[in-house]
Amino acid sequence: MSNNLELDHLARLLEQSGDYRVLRRLTPRSIYDEGDDPAAGRGVFLDLETTGLDPELHEVIEIAAVPFTYSAHGRILTVGEPYCAFQEPFMPISPEITKLTGITPQMVEGSMIDVGEVERVIADADWICAHNSRFDRPFAEQITSAFARKRWACSLSQVGWKEEGFGGAKLGYLLADLGYFASFHRAHEDCMAALEILSRRLPKSGTTAFAKLIAEAEAPTYRVWATLAPFERKETLKARGYRWNGTPKPDRPKAWYRDLSEEAVGLEFEWLRREVYGYDADISVAEITAYDRFSNRI
């Protein structure tokens, strides 16, 4: 204890000099807010480690699902008992994945995710949160279809970190801006780091990062499809922020698309007709909510 006090004193001296910033190791906690606000909802923060980036080719090798409660004002209150597990994949874990995640073939040998336990943990969750839901959700839905019936939020893309003055949106950058560091690329540690970040008030808006996240996740977005756009307008569409869907599915044509807020859709129609089509083209649009956002179904 005395050694810790001495180190804390030295850290404060360094910070007070104005020439140093000191990062402290993040200590995970189970209670974030001891105020009078009652719990208004329940979330689960999810992180997965996998053998690669493609859910069609690669497999989950580690899961952490951390339940938490939050208030009506978007304050994270408590963190519950997490479910953490390894799973042995059918294909070998490459040395590159071991280097990235710290997970070796020996660590996962004979292990299997308990799907029933995962479903129990998320059963009454109002939100599933992840720091990169575009990556995690397709893999999660392969573990159990229960994830497909939940609303998802992404703390990487649905909080305006740069607008709030942070240096970047990666967990390491966000923690460093708050004065902390942690071990990353292991599922449970990443979840706890993200929850700490989401519990804090943002420096410019004054609201908690979690409140900002849920407000953004609750708002519907609209996918505008630039179907049959002329090939020579490809670079114009890319510069505007459109992405190419090369795998057609029902209600998902082989075409360029862009996701927008409701307020921006009308102006986007005008832009497409003026800059891409050159005539009064019919343009298709589909509403996207948190129940489908980040999934491979859209």
Image (cartoon, rainbow, N blue to C red):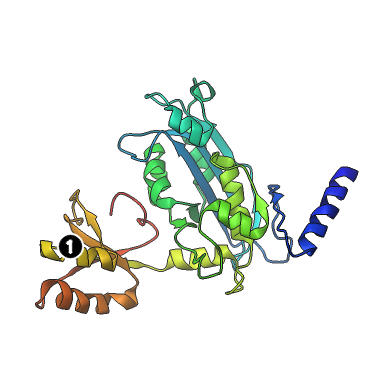
Residue at the right extreme, as displayed: 2
Q: Does 129 appear above or below 189?
A: below
- Left or right of 9? Residue 159 is left
Q: Does 20 appear above or below 187?
A: below
- Left or right of 33? Residue 57 is left
Q: Secondary structure at mark 1?
A: helix
Quarter of the picture containing the C terminus is bottom left
One can see residue 152 in this view:
yes
In the foreground, 140 or 57: 57
Q: Which residue corresponds to the image point at 87% horizontal and 43% vertical from the top-left?
A: 3
In the foreground, 286 or 18: 18
Q: Position of residue 88 (x, y in %)?
A: 45, 25
Residue at the front extreme, as displayed: 19
**Mark 1 burial class by Cα count in 10 Å: few <14, some 14-19, many 20+:** some
User: Which residue in the structure is indicated by mark 1?
Assistant: 234
- Left or right of 59? Residue 6 is right
Count of marks overlaid on the render: 1
In the foreground, 100 or 15: 15
- Left or right of 45? Residue 36 is right
Q: Which residue corresponds to the image point at 73% horizontal and 65% vertical from the top-left?
A: 35
One can see residue 76 in this view:
no
Quarter of the picture containing the N terminus is top right
Q: Position of residue 41 (x, y in %)?
A: 57, 59
Q: Which residue corresponds to the image point at 16% horizontal and 78% vertical from the top-left?
A: 274
Q: Position of residue 251 (x, y in %)?
A: 19, 57
Q: Which residue corresponds to the image point at 10% horizontal and 78% vertical from the top-left?
A: 280
Q: Position of residue 196 (x, y in %)?
A: 63, 55
Q: Does 155 appear above or below 162?
A: above
User: Which amino acid is tagged 1?
Assistant: Lys
